[in-house]
Amino acid sequence: MSGLKLGFIGFGEAGSNIAAGLIEEGLTDVTAYALECRQVDGVTEHKDAAGAIAGRDIVISAVTANVALEVAEMCAPLLKPGQIYIDVNSVSPGTKKKIADVINGVGARFVEVSIMGAVPGPRHTVPILMCGEAAPDVITALEPFGMNLTDLGPEYGRAAATKMFRSVMIKGLEALLQECVLGASKYGAADQVLESVGEGYPGVDWVELANHMLGRTAVHGMRRAAEMDEVAATLSELGIEPMMAAAAAKRIRWAASQGLRDKFGIEGPKTFHEVVDIIGKG
């Protein structure tokens, strides 16, 4: 797609990193609208969604799971027939299908996307799964800029389901590690516990994993808890009681409510001990 015009609705960690990577690869026309818009050289910020959407070939919604449908409903009247609207938010397949109905209903073309990894670092090259009839057109437009896109077919739901059930493992382990080290630290035994786990499950540096995962909770806990709410909703839609997903959401949300982001900022803590020092005081 020559002269690609790209717009972002929501411009936090995911949107800003993807945009920065694409601009480095040569994309020259990028707009964004967000309540809190990160600064990226080469991105034109707008004061409203209409400005960020107007004239765009592709619009990317990169907000949070709990407002993804609401944002789609806000954007739909602003879209023109033929524009592609991509939702990259971690929501259930059912929510993705509702968004698809909203967007396709106004003559625009909806593409469901799941980002399969942390965006900082790989930025625009992070693995991405896609569903929807317009997915091949998105690949044609964005692969020349180095994006790592996989088309799972025209039917909505599969990309979201892949992300949701991956989160059962990833964020479930995050919640388990948090609860483990929080309790063990009361006895000064957290490092010994993790070393013992490593003896039973070799090949993983469990201390470093705890540092990483509790760091993610500190910075992105509320968003990650909202994603686990969506996982629970996905399981419920399938008639499976979300015992583990619901518990993980509760544990992650509790930690996030302890003011960790205010304490550490977007860089996050270096070790899990820093997190425990705050949330373990009670």
Image (cartoon, rainbow, N blue to C red):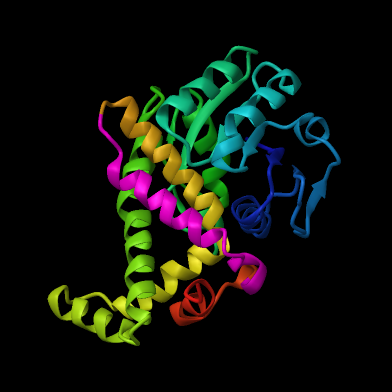
| Res. 261 image quadrant | bottom right
Where residue 146 appears, as percent x and y from the top left, is 53, 53
Res 213 quadrant in image: bottom left
* Residue 88 percent location from the top left of the image: 53, 40
| SS assignment for the magenta stretch, majority | helix
Q: Is residue 3 visible?
A: no
Image spot of residue 76 (x, y percent): 68, 21
Q: Residue at x 47, y 74 (%)?
A: 280
**Is residue 253 covered in magenta?**
yes
Magenta stretch?
Answer: 240-264
Query: Can see residue 250?
Result: yes
Q: Pick the residue in front: 25 or 117.
A: 117
Q: Position of residue 97 (x, y in %)?
A: 47, 22
Between 24 and 230, the residue placed more toward the observer is 230
Vertical arrangement, residue 20 with respect to residue 65, above or below: below
In the rendered view, does 42 fall on the left or right side of 150? right
Q: Nearer the viewer, residue 142 or 80?
A: 80
The single residue placed furthest to the front in the displayed view is 282
Residue in front for this viewpoint, 208 or 3? 208
- The residue under the point 59% across, 18% down is 102
